[in-house]
Amino acid sequence: MLKYIIFDFDGTLADSKMAFISSWNILAEKYRFKEIKFDDIETLKKLSIKERCKLLNFQMYKLPIIIPQFYKLYRKSINDVNLFDGIKDMLSGLEKKGYKTAIISSNSKENILFFLKRNQIDCVTNVLCSGSLFSKDKLIEKFLRENQLESSEVIYVGDEKRDLVACKKAGIKMIWVSWGYDSIEAIQGEKPDYKVHKPSEILTVI
């Protein structure tokens, strides 16, 4: 029986494209990466992380250096981050049905808590964050241990291939949302348990 619904943040709950682009482009100018235009997003969504890095002239080994700087810049642009349409109603619907909600993200906890407060969302009971893009499975496992939950008692909602990989490693099911950062072309090889195309469908699946 499901008890907790765990959400990714960027691309799942929050439409952060403008903050992402502005933060990235500041770093791109500093480190000579390729800048991103808004029109580039649809192309990038279809690519793997490695393919994106190659296109943007970014080396993966620089992630530990870039990620902290990126989310500090993101914080300055957080007023450009908005809830996707229908998210607030969906979260309210889950709360009314007795489900608890949590967020597991590679964004910073400070950014997420500020965003939740600004949008008057108080139903999220846990926020877990990691500076690594590829350690969500460890955070999921930590969340299960700390809350004494079985893998069958949670489901993750996310938008990226790395979310799917992490969920498989942690042994939990996942709902993939189509409005985020990875398109169907990027994730179809991972075969998500469920696919949804608008927030209200999350309620239907659950």
Image (tube, rainbow, N blue to C red):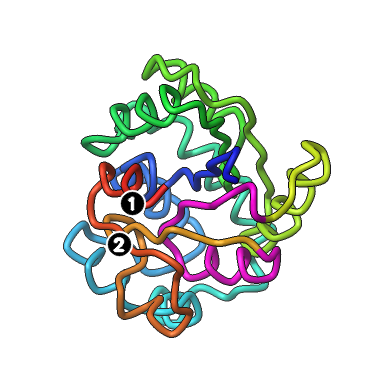
Image-quadrant location for residue 195: bottom left
Tell me the amino acid under the disc marked 1. Answer: Ile
Give SS at disc 2: loop
Q: Classify 10 Å Cα crowding around label 2: few (below 14), some (14-19), many (20 and above).
A: some
Q: Is residue 60 above or below residue 64?
A: below
Query: Which segment did they paint magenta?
Result: 152-171
> Percent position (x, y) of residue 157?
46, 52
- State the residue at coordinates (61%, 64%): 167
Asked whether, in this view, residue 194 is left or right of residue 99, the answer is left
Q: Which residue is mark 2?
A: 36
Mark 2 to mark 1 CA distance (whole Å):
6 Å
- State the residue at coordinates (43%, 58%): 175
Name the chief secondary structure element in magenta. helix
Residue 163 is one of the magenta-drawn residues: yes
Q: Which mark is residue 21?
A: 1
> Percent position (x, y) of residue 24?
42, 54
Q: Classify 10 Å Cα crowding around label 1: few (below 14), some (14-19), many (20 and above).
A: some
Q: Pointer 2 and pointer 1: residues touching (CB < 8 Å)?
A: yes
Front in this rendered view, residue 80 or 89 = 89
Front in this rendered view, residue 108 or 121 = 121
Image-quadrant location for residue 94: top left
Asked whether, in this view, residue 102 is left or right of residue 11, the answer is right
- State the residue at coordinates (45%, 55%): 158
Residue 165 is one of the magenta-drawn residues: yes
Front in this rendered view, residue 193 or 141 = 193
Front in this rendered view, residue 117 or 110 = 117
Q: Is residue 89 above or below residue 183?
A: above
Give SS at disc 1: helix
